[in-house]
Image (cartoon, grey):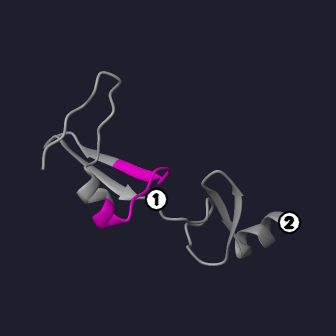
């Protein structure tokens, strides 16, 4: 599948791909690049603790920022 960059620098992700990956409007994505090959990789952002990276027992702080219960306890000491 091909797409192009518009004048604002945006890339349209074809509907077929969005449906397959369950990506809806507002889905947060992580972007990584390989400058040597010219490849860009998009991954759905996974919720994880801002301090330790765990994905369990998370508290939502704001936007896409999360803190796990263990780190929250440490911060209160």
* Residue 29 lies within the magenta run: yes
Q: Is residue 18 left or right of residue 38?
A: right
For marks 2 and 1 on the same chain, the one whose residue lies earlier in the sequence: 1
Residue 65 rendering spot, x and y as whole percentages: 63, 55
Quadrant of the rendering where the C terminus is positioned: bottom right
Mark 2 neighbour density, 10 Å: few (under 14) some (14–19) many (20 or more): few
Q: Quadrant of residue 2?
A: top left
From what the image shows, is residue 47 above or below residue 27?
below
Instruction: Work out how far the residue at label 2 is from the one at label 1, CA to CA, in angstroms.
Output: 27 Å
Residue 34 rendering spot, x and y as whole percentages: 22, 45
Residue 61 rendering spot, x and y as whole percentages: 72, 57
Looking at the rendered structure, the number of numbered marks drawn on it comes to 2
| Residue at image coords 32%, 48% | 32
Q: Secondary structure at mark 2?
A: helix
* Residue 47 lies within the magenta run: no
| Residue at image coords 30%, 21% | 7
Front position in the image: 28 or 55: 28
Q: What residue is disc 1 on? A: 45
Task: Kindly identify which numbered label has been placed on residue 19.
Answer: none
Q: Secondary structure at mark 1?
A: loop
Image: magenta residue range: 19-31
From what the image shows, is residue 6 above or below residue 14?
above
- Tell us which disc is closer to us: 2 or 1: 1
Q: What residue is disc 2 on? A: 76
């Amino acid at each position: 599948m091909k797409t192009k960059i518009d004048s604002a620098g945006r890339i349209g992700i074809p509907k077929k791909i969005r449906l397959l990956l369950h990506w809806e409007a507002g889905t947060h994505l992580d972007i990584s690049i390989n400058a040597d090959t010219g490849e860009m990789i998009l991954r759905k952002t996974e919720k994880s603790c801002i301090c330790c990276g765990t994905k369990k027992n998370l508290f939502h702080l704001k936007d896409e920022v999360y803190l796990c219960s263990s780190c929250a306890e440490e911060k209160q000491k």
